Amino acid sequence: MMIPAIIVFIPLYAAYFRKVPVYESFVEGAKEGFPTAVQIIPHLVGMMVAVSIFRETGAMQFYLQLFQPVLSLFHFPEEAFPLALLRPISGAGSLAFVESIFRAHGPDSYLGRLVSTMQGSTDTTLYVLTVYFGAVGIRRSLYAVKVGLLADLAGFLASWLIVTLVFGG
């Protein structure tokens, strides 16, 4: 209830008290946003192609098999591991994966709670860096990629630890 009130209040305040032409300001801002959207299209296309290649070439299956002994050693559920691979790359792909876990195991199951927490505790790091760095023209992003992926790893591990401690595994 508070957010819609704020959304209505701000333009009214700007129009009546600050005498700002609200509609004209909105249209001018939208015009400035269009070149930015066009500028990031090549970066988005590149990211979508990379995601498709990752899935279609079997790279995901390769990494699942590669990490399977480590996952078994720490009793990490193998069903949740593809989310760790998909989440930094694609928000929609990872959300579809979470939905498939919900269908198979239920949202209130241990796996449902784990993937929900993992989804909420991490970000689409590579997508965000592609869009935002592409929009402002930053080309040297190696440190940002490292820090972002390290933060994702910390989010996945903390999610697993906390969900396992609270809900059991």
Image: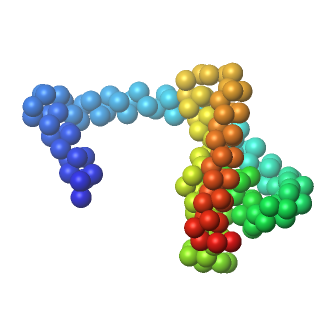
Give residue 123's position: percent from left, percent from top.
59, 46
Q: Is residue 93 visible?
A: no
At horizontal 62% and vertical 65% (from top left) the residue drawn is 165
Quadrant the N terminus occupies: bottom left
Report which quarter residue 101 is drawn in: bottom right
Give residue 109's position: percent from left, percent from top.
61, 76
At horizontal 61% and vertical 46% (from top left) the residue drawn is 124
154 and 26: which one is in front? 154
Residue 22 horizontal side relative to residue 143, left or right: left
Give residue 30's position: percent from left, percent from top.
37, 33
Give residue 2's position: percent from left, percent from top.
23, 54
154 and 49: which one is in front? 154
Report which quarter residue 61 is drawn in: bottom right
Report which quarter residue 18 is drawn in: top left
Q: Is residue 19 visible?
A: yes
Residue 37 horizontal side relative to residue 86, left or right: left
96 and 148: which one is in front? 148
* Most distant residue in the front direction: 165
161 and 138: which one is in front? 161
**Is 130 above or below relative to 159?**
above
Coloring scheme used: rainbow
At horizontal 62% and vertical 49% (from top left) the residue drawn is 155
**Is 83 above or below relative to 154?**
below
Quadrant the C terminus occupies: bottom right
**Is 10 above or below relative to 17?**
below
At horizontal 75% and vertical 67% (from top left) the residue drawn is 77
